[in-house]
Amino acid sequence: MAVYIRFSNKDTLVIKAPKKSPLVLRMVVLAFAVVCGVYICSICLSQTSPHTKAKFLDIQVFDRPCNTSSTEQWETPYVHYPKPETYSREECSCNPVRYFAILSTQRSGSGWFETLLNNHTNISSNGEIFSIKDRRSNISSIFKTMDKIYNLDWFSSASKNECSAAVGFKWMLNQGLMEHHEEIVEYFNRKGVSAIFLFRRNLLRRMISVVANSYDKDTRLLNGTHKSHVHSPLEAQILAKYKPTINATLLLPDLKQVEETTAKALEFFKSTRHIVLYYEDVITNHTKLKDVQEFLRLPYGDLKSRQVKIHSGPLSNQVENWDDIQKALKGTSYERFLHADYQI
Ligand SMILES: *[C@@H]1O[C@H](CO)[C@@H](O)[C@H](O)[C@H]1NC(C)=O
Ligand SMILES: *[C@@H]1O[C@H](CO)[C@@H](O)[C@H](O)[C@H]1NC(C)=O
Ligand SMILES: *[C@@H]1O[C@H](CO)[C@@H](O)[C@H](O)[C@H]1NC(C)=O
Ligand SMILES: *[C@@H]1O[C@H](CO)[C@@H](O)[C@H](O)[C@H]1NC(C)=O
Ligand SMILES: *[C@@H]1O[C@H](CO)[C@@H](O)[C@H](O)[C@H]1NC(C)=O
Ligand SMILES: *[C@@H]1O[C@H](CO)[C@@H](O)[C@H](O)[C@H]1NC(C)=O
Ligand SMILES: *[C@@H]1O[C@H](CO)[C@@H](O)[C@H](O)[C@H]1NC(C)=O
């Protein structure tokens, strides 16, 4: 009996110990929680592990670094392996891509030059991207546009996409390029963009072309459509029939201003990797096109354009007031522009 009582006494003692009981309960709850947690985690892991494994595999396949051993050391900043967001480069994903921009002025042959470049299987030159004001309204807009082009995500009639080995566009000096030159030079150097300057030596011929082209914009000589570039001798003949009158008073200051702007552009962009070309040289010297392809590190191709020159022959036949122009330029540094400097 006594034992029983003592036992029951002990029992009641244990039950009655008010300070120890919450500790034990807490330990039990904690242990339960830990076990549950471990169990849930293990289930989660076992369910997701096949997925994660597959994902890692995908990424490994996708991100396998390209073999760059054939790239020379100096070239590294200019060689890119873009991954377009909108499609896969597939078998060409490890073909290196060069970035370029043709920096030019209106009526300097850049349209014709671009059709030549685009005749190369591996060049995509996407046209005058920044002629649209919204794209150049501020520097972030400019950067965003260029990022898209250089990532091969820009679609135009010229885009060749997956097997492009050089991608770019043409940019006129008066399309935000001079205004934002500091940021753009920084971008070119950071991203490894090469600049191709294309200017015209004979600024007088260029000016006549500018005036005639802006006249055609208003009058639309070709059956009511305005054409800056033509593809048949007949069209060229019709456009060339119009002889503009050049304001002889404004001639000198205008020529001077163009000359200064191009000199400034060369100065601004001198720290970028660049090449300087003149329209007249590209026309008369086929080695110049070879130089460009070498500059872009592309396999050499014989490039052709279907464009036809609008104004050919002596300058004196192309303007209405040739005598005034002669008078205005005689004895100035621009006198040389009066003489034909190339023949087509
Ligand atoms: C990379 O290509 C070169 C030949 O261009 C070859 O000798 C080299 O083994 C290649 N390296 C790898 C890691 O595939
Ligand atoms: C290049 O020009 C030639 C002659 O006009 C043409 O046959 C060829 O298809 C052009 N190639 C490309 C890639 O545009
Ligand atoms: C830049 O220009 C774009 C297009 O005109 C506009 O949508 C955007 O808000 C501008 N960004 C800044 C920072 O001004
Ligand atoms: C040029 O493009 C062709 C396909 O059009 C491709 O086979 C070739 O590898 C490309 N060349 C370069 C240098 O990327
Ligand atoms: C203009 O249109 C007429 C009739 O449609 C056509 O015969 C002529 O060749 C066109 N001229 C040009 C320059 O396109
Ligand atoms: C030439 O331009 C000046 C300045 O804009 C102007 O005053 C002059 O009348 C123009 N001359 C002719 C012949 O149009
Ligand atoms: C043509 O261009 C090449 C390279 O740019 C140059 O070496 C050569 O002297 C030029 N030829 C002529 C006739 O100007």
Image (cartoon, grey):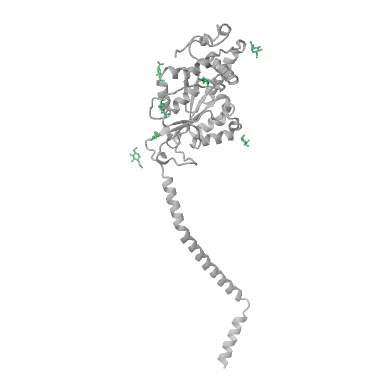
Examine the rendered structure and indicate whether residue 30 appears above or below residue 201.
below
Q: Nearer the viewer, residue 129 or 320?
A: 320
Q: Quadrant of the C terminus?
A: top left
Counting from the top left corner in percent of width and height, residue 14 is at: 59, 81
Task: Please tell me how many numbered marks the rendered image carries.
Answer: 0
Counting from the top left corner in percent of width and height, residue 56 is at: 44, 51
Q: Quadrant of residue 135?
A: top right
In the displayed orientation, state which residue is furthest to the bottom.
1
Q: Residue at x 55, y 68 (%)?
A: 33
Q: Residue at x 45, y 52 (%)?
A: 55
Q: Residue 149: in sight, yes or no?
A: yes
Q: Quadrant of the N terminus?
A: bottom right
Locate residue 285 relative to residue 321 in the image: left or right: left
Q: Nearer the viewer, residue 328 or 184?
A: 328
Q: Nearer the viewer, residue 210 or 338?
A: 210
Examine the rendered structure and indicate whether residue 156 appears above or below residue 55.
above
Counting from the top left corner in percent of width and height, residue 189 is at: 50, 32
Q: Residue 99: in sight, yes or no?
A: no
Examine the rendered structure and indicate whether residue 334 appears above or below residue 6.
above
Locate residue 80 relative to residue 173 in the image: left or right: left
Q: Quadrant of residue 268?
A: top right
Q: Residue at x 39, y 25 (%)?
A: 302
Counting from the top left corner in percent of width and height, residue 231 is at: 47, 22
